[in-house]
Image: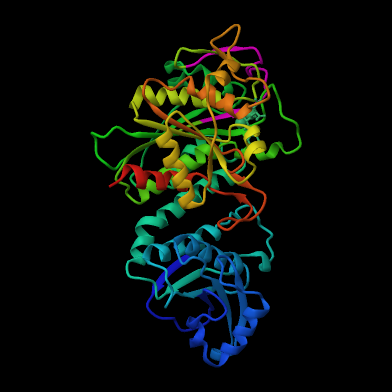
Amino acid sequence: MQIRFSDSRPAGDYALVLPASGQGDDKLEGLGSDLDMVKAAMRRQRFEGKARQTASAWLGADNGRQLLVLGEGDGDAKAAEALGATVSAQLLTSGETHAVIDLSGTEFDADAAARLALGATLRSWRYDRYRTKLKDKQKVSLVSITIVGAADGAEDRWNNRYQPVAAGTALTRELVTEPANIIYPASFVERVQQHNQDTGLEISFLGQQEMEELGMGALLGVNQGSVREPRLLVMKWMGAGGSETPTVLIGKGVTFDTGGISIKPAAGMESMKWDMGGAGAVAGAMRALAGRKAKANVIGICGLVENMPDGNAQRPGDVVTSMSGQTIEVINTDAEGRLVLCDAITYAQKEFSPTRIIDLATLTGAMVISLGHEHAGIFSNDDDLAEDLIDAGKKTGDHLWRQPLGEAYDKLIDSPIADMKNVGPRPAGSITAAQFLQRFIEGETKWAHLDIAGMAWSDTAKTNYDKGATGFGVRILDAFVEDELEG
Ligand code: BES
Ligand code: MN
Ligand code: ZN
């Protein structure tokens, strides 16, 4: 989607979008001879001016033009973002090629107008690469949006603050959408490199041999049944200069999760192509931070593996030694995410001594049972960190809900043969997974774990995305960095 800002409405064909706070909004007076008809249309479509509400009409002036009246809601940045998203959702395949959103006379400030552009861009994202037989009617028609009458500074705010976030979210969604024959550990790294050709993000990775030398037996055990080589992707953005200790983001990147020898049922297994949603979110967040030149030191690490059954795959009952030296009895090879994350967590601490670690993972089905598709779970050893992330979620619409940790849960993963086992009993499955990760957090390191299993993919369209990959997590991380690390 091409976004433009302008002082006046352009010439030519376009659909006109006018925000309104209700049926009697004075801003509509400019419609002149069409006003009565538009008011009737709003009445009959029960328009009240709430965010996401729309009323449509066909203007007689200018040889006919589609008009969309959109609810102004609370007049804040969130309402503006929803408005932009609604324009894209309504017009994307409508046949209209251009929309003009006239903000003259609205309450929206520069930040809100830029968030409007963000909403419009996020909601217009699609991935049609493999759809070679789309009918014309199914194809995207809307190619550009002109925002007229925005407050001073809106265009700058869009270009320098939110456009990079849209680009980061697009990267995440692309990685999550691509099937596992296209995106596997090595190609994940390459795709991230392609999307960062001029961002200045420093990208490197460890291969199989380097990870063997470091003793990452837990991560490598998961990949043992795969013909693909694993990767540990490291993305560095040191925007605050050398002296400040970094924040590390860690993502679970299981490019396909069959369950391994503890194989999953066939029905729905294809959805496990998005078991790299945590790694995708970390890569997208790093793309966003580098793109907007965030004044913060942030390092993104993705543990990239494929969990396959094979003659060489690890077995239930195997004992592996993690990079930390702690041993793990692998009771269930389908509880693989924690095995990948634990070595990434140890590596992060040994290599970068971070102040805080935030990990994101599509870790447990139990998380989807508890919170559904409305919140991701957040587990943390630090109340302030948890609160800051929850706040970032509220601000951006990627919602988090705090979950408990405690010694009684921790005991459930003690093993009779090793230091721990990789699964507890069925109850509290998301919590015991988090307890497992916490056993690898050293000293004073602050840590938060986001279980995004219910959020990385959506079977229904929502305000900011169509059905499919959501990009969940990118905006939480981006907002957290801005609010807590910059300035
Ligand atoms: N990737 C899955 C979790 C998952 C399930 C994510 C459904 C999204 C939707 C994870 O690796 C897994 O298989 N977890 C097991 C753990 C169990 C064996 C303790 C689960 O949740 O069933
Ligand atoms: Mn699994
Ligand atoms: Zn998994």
| Quadrant position of residue 453 | top right
Relative to 241, residue 350 above or below: above
Q: Is residue 351 left or right of residue 454?
A: left
**How many discs appear?**
0
Which quadrant does ligand 3 occupy? top right
Residue plotted at (42% across, 77% down): 105
Percent coordinates x, y for residue 119 in the rendering: 50, 60
Q: Is residue 351 positioned above or below 370 on the image?
A: above
Residue toward you, 149 or 159: 149
Question: In the rendered view, how is the structure colored?
Answer: rainbow
Please tell me which residue is depicted at 65% across the width and 12% down the height of the picture.
Answer: 317
Residue 1 shows in the view: no
Q: Is residue 54 above or below residue 477?
A: below
Magenta span has 313?
yes
Q: Residue at x 61, y 56 (%)?
A: 462
**x, y percent for residue 369:** 67, 37
Residue 160 covered by magenta stretch: no
Viewer can see residue 87: yes
Quadrant of the rendered structure where residue 135 is? bottom right
- Please name the residue shown 49% across and 16% down the image: 322
**Residue 325 located left or right of residue 175:** left
Residue 57 percent coordinates (x, y): 62, 81
In this view, the residue in front, 156 or 195, is: 156
Write down the region rendered in magenta. 304-322
| Front residue of this view, candidates 400 and 158 | 400
Could you say where residue 2 lies in the image, as x and y percent from the top left?
Answer: 46, 66
Per the picture, the main secondary structure of the magenta-coloured stretch is loop
Is 348 drawn above or below residue 367 in the view shown? Answer: above
Q: In the current view of this chain or complex, which residue is farthest to the top?
A: 417
